[in-house]
Amino acid sequence: MALSTKPLSGMRQRFPEQFRVEKFVTDMLSGSSVSAGFQEYDGPVIEPLALFAAKSGGELVGRQSYSFTDRGEREVILRPEMTPSLARMIASSGELQLPVRWFSMPLCYRYERPQRGRVREFLQFNLDILGSSSLASELEVILVLNGIMKSFKAPSSIYRIGWSSRRFMTEALLRCGVKQELHSGVFSAIDKKDKMKEEAWSDYLLQSCGGDKKVAGTVVSLVSVESPSDTWLVDLMAESPALREVQEFDMLLEKTGISSAVFSPGVVRGLDYYTGIVFELMDTGRENRRSLCGGGRYDNLVGLFGAGRISGVGFGLGVLTLTLFLESYGLVPDSVRQAAPADVYIAIASSSVIATAGLLAESLRNSGIRVMMDVSGKKLGKQFSEASRNRITQVITVGVEQAETGIYKMKYLPDGKVTAGSVEELIRILK
Ligand code: HAM
């Protein structure tokens, strides 16, 4: 029986056109990071399972992990995210001058049900600041995120950065009457609000609130609040430093004019390590329902490695989710998809001049010109068609006469104009 032509479900393979689109996206992400003073890093794809079991959360490690025992009897995992590896790298380099601003583009693995925007092998752009507790860090990463959306020419009406605070929500839940031991379950329920049918979600929330209808009702009121200055909320949170922090951040966002950032107590994030401000970037339309990006502050992750408390703040952004979003709104330029793989095609009129064609290709390439030399051995007409199919506009033909005289003819396919000249002259024209 022949082998299957399909890769494993959820694993990625990209044909050249898809690769060009992905490269357009990742180059833009790297460019925005570098322009804000972030430096690139990377870590191992295979990590000890314990690294993620400690803080990433039961769902990610228990149900979505690619984990196995290696030949040395170690429990290992294909990294489902980058943040714990980053925390370990920071903890292990005692000589780092803090704060550090780093970014990365890791391949990550999660055994999720493949669907639009969710696969099992995905590139996740990460950008983090470590070693600063100032709210300026939260503002900085959201400014970079907003700048990224602007770099793709996405108007602020088509995306929304919903944000809240874990610290604030922990205190608010206590004031709503949710006992501390129920918080983790209630956070999970809040996180699933937009992923479940309304009735099923209400039941789930009620259960996570220990079956207390009044408490569950107050939690529903809490997640519906739209401003940190809401009078019901201000009453509930009287004298709370966590509310003051949220109000201060709200003001910073307003003063910097990030109109896409909206206070949303329903954003609590599914990962366990977040402690402060958290945020998620969503499409405001209906086509892309899962988050494009999520992040926030984590105070206690680096401390797990015994390196003292170094607070971090950052986000992870799915390259696939962002690409689907950009495609939905026509924000991937046609020129990216249709880019020609070379500037010039060298057509070969006779097999006796292959070496001459090869030397010509080499001279042009040494001058920085992208050259595709014919390898098909087909008739000249077919070679010209091959150049057109590849959207290459210039074709130089090498025949016996050209090989003898060193003077080549170059045809510009869109208007059929022919120019003749030596290698040096052609290089000058092409450049
Ligand atoms: P996360 O919310 O789990 O956060 O993932 C961030 C983003 O990665 C998601 O919003 C989504 O775009 C993308 N993503 C997640 N799972 C998949 C998947 N199965 N297929 C395609 N894309 C996916 C984190 O991972 C945190 N470590 C982010 C972070 C960095 N927080 C602070 N620094």
Image (spheres, helix red, strand yellow):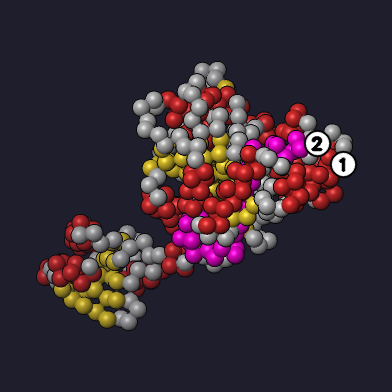
Q: What element carries label 2?
A: loop
Q: Which of 338 and 137 is in front in this view?
A: 137
Q: What element carries label 1?
A: helix
Label drawn at residue 214: 1
Q: Which of 345 and 276 is in front in this view?
A: 276
**How packed is label 2: few (under 14 Cα within 10 Å), some, or many (20 or more)?**
some
Q: Can residue 319 be seen in this view?
A: no
Label drawn at residue 177: 2
Residue 100 percent coordinates (x, y): 41, 37
Three-letter code, disc 2 = Gly
**How packed is label 1: few (under 14 Cα within 10 Å), some, or many (20 or more)?**
few
On screen, residue 135 versus residue 414, left or right, reads: right
Work out which residue is located at the far front of the displayed protein and give it: 239
Disc on the earlier residue, 2 or 1: 2
Q: Where is 410 relative to 142, above or below?
A: below
Q: Residue at x 25, y 62 (%)?
A: 369
Identify the magenta region: 146-175
